[in-house]
Image: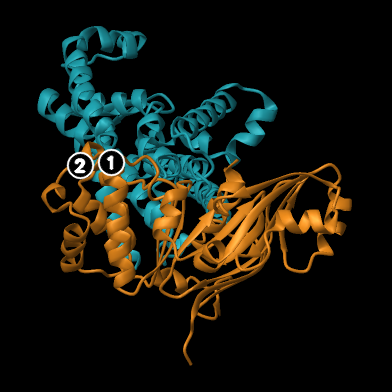
Chain colours: A cyan, B orange
């Protein structure tokens, strides 16, 4: 039965235009940013490494495909919750508002299995979108700007050699996808409560926004709370490019995300199983 | 053992907050009947149908489907087909893909889907998106959807709602065909003419209470119905109870519905002979159901 439910959810998702918005936006936006980075490389380098040029003699350019990917992920990661929650936001709420649950749930299927099938589609979409985001950016950046060493700031200026970079992008992908999955689960939980598919996105983005404020404002209270919030790890992917990689912090972030994911999903299970379909 | 009733409802209660939506409702639905659930808006018809469909989970009482309680089991859903309110499909998918989605949940094969497109006369439009369907076509597709797993019992919430006379006729023909196929059909409707034309049995609900239920022939064709307006219903009820050949069906504020067998002496003459003065006016109802829609 679960296989049939998953096939159904897959068919529903691939036939909705909304599913492709995130992919189309990234497909258009990423090359434009890369072209802009390539075009303004000199100015960009002066902005990023400006004062260091007084201390170092840099031969050639630091702008390459890896730096471009690193910058684009850093810039767009805070916007990704908008795109990654598109499917999760309407996966329940649209069925409530369109009344399709009035037919779907009158079949002898357990609601828990229906929820699991929808959850798997949300997971699949989020993982795929994040994969597309990171590796499409890497591919296009590489093709446009070529390879090279990656210079990042970590305890000063850290140069990562060309053959030490790709696995770090995979790690960055895993870290950012873990946080994004947690964000999608929050949105899915809200979707089980709402008939309007916009409401879950607005609330999710508000939560991410508030979480970002907590992680950026250097107050003692916020600093003590931040490690326990999944939103505090939204930019943790940057640590993939540190040397050494802070594995301990990364594993803690996985634990925190797992805790919040389970919390959101348990609430979603309880709500959906008790929900009376009245419209 | 022969089971002559497919559904038995005993002492059903449902509350939304402080609102008692169903209040001690009990009736049975005979096998192979077209059973009409009638009542004005807010009478509890849709709530009752949603309870059958397990869309509403918290209720009190007992519902037996083929003598098995439905409260802790979803097995009955395999033998029931539903259209609750208006049929709602995935509008961005074709009609065929919609039916395939529902068919997958009950392991129904493509051959059955094709047969049902024939039955509801939508074969030439099965590849069109549901968003391009008229309301009548959606209703017919709804019937096909409800029939996919070959259920014994169909529950259709206002199947004629929004249909033009041609659509109503088509729907009636489909329902008669299904009855001939041995199905039991439970419909809710506001169209009283259709009740007389289609239904074999009825239950009438008002404000969550069962007013009357039974075979339509027994209820309407062998009995006369009167609405009696009174000044004081307590006094009037006491007076009416003294008359042996009438049945008090319902007392709604100062309006009392009574019935009597057609072979009995007409009630107006009885009231005069019994000198009952608490009665203000007496109206003969042309049918039982009209009383509740006045």
Q: Nearer the viewer, residue A149 or B62?
A: B62
Residue drawn at (34%, 25%) of the image = A76
Placement of B48 over or under B93, stated as above or below:
below
- Would you identify the image quadrant in which residue A144 lies? top left
Check the residue under mark 2 and report the chain it is in: B
Work out whether A166 lies above or below B286: above
Residue identified by numbered label 2:
B129
x, y (%) of residue B103? 27, 63
Q: Using the image, tell me which numbered label, if any, was put on residue B91.
A: 1
Helix, strand or loop at mark 2: loop
Task: Name the subunit of mark 1.
Answer: B
Residue A209 location (% of width, % of height): 52, 25
Could you say which is closer to the camera, residue B3 or residue A134? B3
In the visual, does B204 lie left or right of A130? right
Q: State whether discs 1 and 2 lie on one chain.
A: yes
Q: Quadrant of the C terminus of chain B?
A: top right
Instruction: Give the Cα distance between marks 1 and 2.
Output: 6 Å
x then y, percent, for residue B275:
85, 54
């Amino acid at each position: 039965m679960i296989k049939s439910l998953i096939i159904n959810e897959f068919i529903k998702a691939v036939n909705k235009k909304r599913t492709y918005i995130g992919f189309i936006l990234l497909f258009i936006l990423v090359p434009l940013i890369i072209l802009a980075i390539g075009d303004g490389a000199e100015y960009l380098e002066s902005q990023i490494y400006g004062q260091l040029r007084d201390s170092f003699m840099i031969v050639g350019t630091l702008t390459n495909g890896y730096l471009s990917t690193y910058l684009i992920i850093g810039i767009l990661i805070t916007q990704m919750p908008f795109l990654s929650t598109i499917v999760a936001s309407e996966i329940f709420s649209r069925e409530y508002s369109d009344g399709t649950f009035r037919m779907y749930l009158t079949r002898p299927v357990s609601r828990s299995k229906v929820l699991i099938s929808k959850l798997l589609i949300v997971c699949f979409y989020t993982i795929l979108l994040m994969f597309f985001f990171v590796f499409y950016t890497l591919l296009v950046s590489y093709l446009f700007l070529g390879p090279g060493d990656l210079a990042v700031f970590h305890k000063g200026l850290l140069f990562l050699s060309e053959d030490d970079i790709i696995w770090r992008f995979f790690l960055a992908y895993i870290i950012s996808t873990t946080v994004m999955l947690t964000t999608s689960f929050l949105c899915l939980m809200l979707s089980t409560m709402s008939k309007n598919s916009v409401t879950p996105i607005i609330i999710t983005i508000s939560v991410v926004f508030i979480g970002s404020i907590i992680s950026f404002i250097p107050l003692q209270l916020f600093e003590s709370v931040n490690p326990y919030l999944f939103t505090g790890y939204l930019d943790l992917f940057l640590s993939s490019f540190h040397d050494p990689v802070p594995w301990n912090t990364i594993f803690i972030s996985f634990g925190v995300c797992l805790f919040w994911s389970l919390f959101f999903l348990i609430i979603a299970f309880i709500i959906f199983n008790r929900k009376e379909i009245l419209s | 053992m022969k089971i002559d009733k497919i559904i038995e409802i005993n002492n059903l209660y449902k509350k939304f907050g402080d609102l008692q939506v169903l209040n001690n409702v009990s009736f049975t639905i005979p096998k192979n009947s077209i059973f009409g659930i009638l009542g004005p808006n807010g009478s509890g018809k849709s709530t009752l149908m949603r309870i059958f469909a397990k869309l509403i989970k918290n209720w009190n009482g007992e519902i037996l489907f083929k003598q098995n309680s439905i409260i802790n089991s979803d097995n009955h859903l395999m033998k029931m087909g539903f259209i609750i309110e208006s049929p709602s499909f995935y509008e961005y998918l074709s009609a065929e893909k919609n039916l395939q989605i529902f068919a997958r949940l009950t392991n129904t094969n493509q051959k059955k889907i094709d047969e049902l497109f024939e039955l509801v006369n939508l074969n030439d439009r099965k590849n069109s998106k549901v968003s391009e369907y008229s309301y009548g076509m959606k209703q017919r597709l709804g019937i096909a959807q409800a029939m996919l797993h070959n259920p014994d019992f169909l529950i259709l919430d206002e199947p004629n709602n929004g249909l033009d006379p041609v659509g109503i006729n088509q729907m009636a023909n489909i329902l008669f065909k299904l009855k001939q196929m041995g199905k039991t059909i439970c419909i809710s409707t506001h169209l009283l003419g259709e009740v007389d034309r289609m239904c074999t049995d009825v239950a009438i609900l008002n404000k969550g209470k069962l007013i009357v239920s039974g075979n339509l022939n027994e209820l309407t064709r062998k009995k006369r119905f009167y609405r009696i307006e009174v000044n004081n219903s307590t006094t009037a009820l006491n007076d009416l109870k003294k008359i042996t050949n009438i049945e008090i069906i319902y007392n709604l504020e100062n309006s009392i519905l009574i019935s009597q067998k057609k072979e009995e002496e007409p009630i107006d003459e009885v009231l005069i002979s019994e000198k009952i003065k608490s009665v203000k006016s007496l109206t003969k109802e042309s049918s039982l159901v009209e009383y509740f829609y006045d």
